[in-house]
Amino acid sequence: EVKLLESGGGLVQPGGSLRLSCAASGFTFTDFYMSWIRQPPGKAPEWLGVIRNKANGYTTEYNPSVKGRFTISRDNTQNILYLQMNTLRAEDTAIYYCARSSGGYPFDYWGQGVMVTVSS
Amino acid sequence: DIVMTQGVLPNPVPSGESASITCRSSKSLVYKDGKTYLNWFLQRPGQSPQLLTYWMSTRASGVSDRFSGSGSGTYFTLKISRVRAEDAGVYYCQQVREYPLTFGSGTKLEIK
């Protein structure tokens, strides 16, 4: 069974940093692209970025809205996806999801999400 | 960025009736391979989004055949036949034609 489990969320002050993790199981992690998506309360999801699979060299793409502040990485020995978030702002407050996909294929599995609140 | 614009439903929809949700993209979502890179998701309250259809009209595994996607390069429709209480939630279209991937603002479906 495919499982994606996010962790690392919480309350952080403006200007602070946070690292989210997404533990993956039930599939061959290195075969899949992994994305981070966030959703502010009551609003639509926003795609943040992707890290491609082994066949595509684990390269990354980012939404310009977070490029330079957020970094996506993966540990392919432990099947964990990461999102490093720096210089956090109030508008980064959202539920953060990880999701898997593959080249040309959609997000077929999502995690349950983790809440990040940026506030003083 | 490709902007996705979704329509509004005349809620609530009576159980057993059909509902059509519309989505428009600011650019054609047809890629050179001939596929149209448009996905539909349903998000029930308190849950993660669930994939319904991809490549505009291909149903995801385990999704009821009451859900059908159609459209052209820039105008898309998700039709839900014989709506049930479990279909209630917010529906999102998403383009994966190019980065950054973008979602529509969502269409809420309420069932009567």
Image: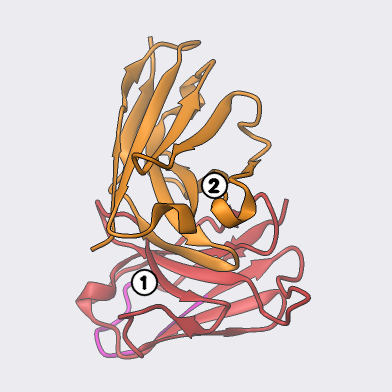
Chain colours: A orange, B red
* Residue at horizontal 31 percent and vertical 28 percent from the top: A9
Between A106 and A51, the one lying in front of the other is A51
Q: Secondary structure at mark 2?
A: strand
Q: Chain of mark 1?
A: B
Q: CA distance from mark 1 to mark 2?
A: 28 Å
Q: Secondary structure at mark 1?
A: loop
Residue B9 part of the magenta segment: no
Looking at numbered disc 1 in the image, what kind of residue is underneath it? Asn
In x, y percent, where is residue A40?
Answer: 42, 39
Image position of A118 with respect to B50: above or below: above
Image position of B3 with respect to A38: above or below: below
Is residue A103 shown left or right of residue A2? right
For mark 2, what is the residue?
A: A47
Dominant SS of magenta comes to loop
Between A8 and B88, the one lying in front of the other is A8
In x, y percent, where is residue B2?
Answer: 71, 56
**Res. B44 in view:** yes
Provide the residue span drawn in magenta: B12-21
Closer to the camera: disc 1 or disc 2?
2
Q: Are marks 1 and 2 in contact (CB under 8 Å)?
A: no
Q: Chain of mark 2?
A: A
Looking at numbered disc 2 in the image, what kind of residue is underneath it? Trp
In x, y percent, where is residue B59?
Answer: 43, 82
Marking on residue B11:
1
Marking on residue A114:
none
* Residue at horizontal 62 percent and vertical 62 percent from the top: B96
Is residue B85 shown left or right of residue A61? left
In x, y percent, where is residue A81?
Answer: 41, 39
Image position of A87 with respect to A108: above or below: above
